[in-house]
């Protein structure tokens, strides 16, 4: 996989996470089969399997992992289960409340 393809995959993952967030769907409760297809474009549907494979990979990474926007307040858009465990949170909603949903709010002192 070349750098451009990787970037494109990350862009698709971020796009999917935004769709879930905008529709009040928690990413930990979603799987490829249960995702409401009416929320996705035909282009999204074509890459859905690869996008979910990457999301599953991020969940299995040993250690905490997150994706956040570097601009603005550093809004967190994804945290894996290991990071939730580190912060002693049961859900991503609990993590967002604890950290203010920002990278700055989630730094360990």
Image (spheres, rainbow, N blue to C red):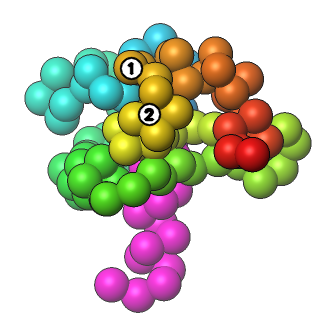
Q: How far from the left and from the top, in percent, is residue 26?
A: 39, 20
Query: For the N terminus, which image quadrant?
Result: bottom left
Please tell me whether residue 33 belongs to the stretch shown in magenta: no
- Residue under pointer 1: 90
Q: Residue furthest right?
A: 72
Answer left or right for 26 relative to 21.
left
Query: Could you classify mark 2 by the number of other residues whose Cα lies within 10 Å: few (under 14), some (14-19), or many (20 or more)?
Result: some
Residue 47 in view of the camera: no
Is the Cβ of the residue at disc 1 closer than 8 Å to that at disc 2?
yes
Which residues lie in the magenta part? 1-15
Above or below, 66 relative to 28: below
Q: Residue at x 48, y 84 (%)?
A: 3
Query: Could you classify mark 1 by the number of other residues whose Cα lies within 10 Å: few (under 14), some (14-19), or many (20 or more)?
Result: few
- Residue under pointer 2: 84
Q: How far from the left and from the top, in percent, is residue 84?
A: 44, 34
Q: Residue at x 43, y 73 (%)?
A: 6
In the picture, residue 82 is in which quadrant?
A: top left
Above or below, 47 relative to 93: below
Answer left or right for 35 relative to 39.
left
In the image, 55 versus 3, the foreground residue is: 55
Label placed on residue 38: none
In the image, 92 versus 34, the foreground residue is: 92
In the image, 57 versus 99, the foreground residue is: 99
Helix, strand or loop: magenta stretch: helix
Q: Secondary structure at mark 1?
A: loop
In the image, 61 versus 49, the foreground residue is: 61
């Amino acid at each position: 996989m070349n750098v451009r393809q990787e970037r494109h995959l990350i862009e698709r993952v971020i796009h999917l996470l935004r769709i879930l967030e905008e529709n009040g769907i928690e990413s930990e409760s979603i799987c490829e089969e249960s995702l409401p297809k009416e929320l996705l474009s035909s282009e999204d549907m074509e890459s859905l399997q690869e996008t979910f494979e990457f999301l599953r990979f991020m969940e299995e990474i040993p250690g905490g992992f997150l994706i956040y926007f570097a601009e603005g307040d550093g809004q967190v858009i994804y945290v894996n289960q290991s990071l939730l465990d580190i912060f002693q949170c049961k859900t991503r909603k609990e993590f967002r409340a604890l950290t203010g949903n920002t990278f700055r709010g989630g730094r360990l002192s």
